[in-house]
Image (cartoon, grey):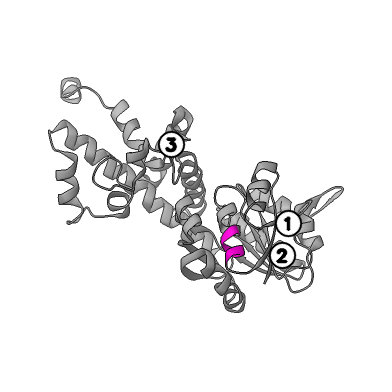
Amino acid sequence: MDIAFIGLGHMGGPMAVNLVTAGHRVTGFDLVSALNEAAAAHGVVIAESAAAAARDVDIVITMLQQGQHVIDAYQGSPGMPGLLASARAGTLFIDSSTIAVADARAVHGLAQGAGFRSLDAPVSGGVMGAEAGTLAFMVGGSDEDFATAEPVLQVMGRRIVHCGGPGLGQAAKVCNNLILGISMIGVSEAFVLGERLGLAHQALFDVASNASGQCWALTTNCPVPGPVSASPANNDYRPGFSGALMAKDLGLAEHAIVDAGIHAELGLLAAAVYRRFAAEGGGGLDFSAIIEDIRAHSGAPGESEAMA
């Protein structure tokens, strides 16, 4: 297929390259020239603008940072046409950004109002998943549009789940990352508690990874070095999924929780914890480095009892 890929950053760049490797003709664009150059070195044809990339293609994929960025890219601005004004009839738009559910539904409305087909398809799996083509896609939109997109998404991902109608891919992503953020805080607090009690990291891992404490945050992204060799903890917390991105995603979850009127104490607390972590210097580290924040804010042994 002829595919336009808008947004060639840490996630979008590898995803576009995987499409090229699979034999698709990919025209890309990013506002950062270095990202365009990196993608071009792997066979992506770089257009002069996002709108130019979207001309005469079958599918337009966007991977941008904020919902407003996606809306602006679709609509364009004075003197600069948007993607919708440039695309030919029948083009399928796929937005793989992680944005608010309300924004995703607004993007669907823009595309469908202009006569185009549309899906929201956020991803999970981080940079390593983007590079390896093993991402998980959570897709919202019609059955027909999902069927068209699925073979293309399978090039970039290992698990493709159709979650329902417009916006429900983003809803699934928000809920998944809410679970992940809460889980990582819980796992990290357990390891810090274990340290204080004299429990070795490996011993706690061996117990919890084979008991009711087992979860992805423990067995794949373990926040302490040693037990899981591929976890960022063994590489000075170089991010696979950064603290800044977790703060952003939990912020989206927070908005959804409030809008839906859900009594979600842990979700709101997790959002506040990661927002502080990112603001205090953790944004560029892997989100599992939250364990360092927990250590830093922990009192001396017995301090809470003395204060009681």
What is the three-letter code of the residue carrying label 3? Leu
Mark 1–mark 2 CB contact (< 8 Å) = yes
Mark 2 vs 3, N-terminal side: 2
Residue receiving disc 1: 74
Mark 1 vs 3, N-terminal side: 1
Q: Main secondary structure of the magenta part?
A: helix
Marks 2 and 3 sit apart, C-alpha to C-alpha, by 36 Å
What is the three-letter code of the residue carrying label 1? Tyr
* Magenta-colored stretch includes residue 18: yes
Q: Nearer the viewer, residue 206 or 108?
A: 206
Marks 1 and 3 sit apart, C-alpha to C-alpha, by 32 Å
What is the three-letter code of the residue carrying label 2? Ala
* Residue 32 visible in the picture: no
For the residue carrying disc 1, how many other residues have a C-alpha within 10 Å: few (<14), some (14-19), or many (20+)? many
Residue receiving disc 2: 111
Going by the picture, which residue comes out furthest to the left? 198
Mark 1–mark 3 CB contact (< 8 Å) = no
Instruction: Provide residue 273's location: percent of width, then percent of height.
Output: 40, 36
Q: Mark 2 against mark 3, which lies toward the viewer?
A: 3
Residue interval drawn in magenta: 17-21
Residue receiving disc 3: 285
Q: Nearer the viewer, residue 130 or 210?
A: 130
Q: Mark 1 against mark 3, which lies toward the viewer?
A: 3
Helix, strand or loop at mark 2: helix
Helix, strand or loop at mark 1: helix
Residue that appears at 38% across and 38% down? 237
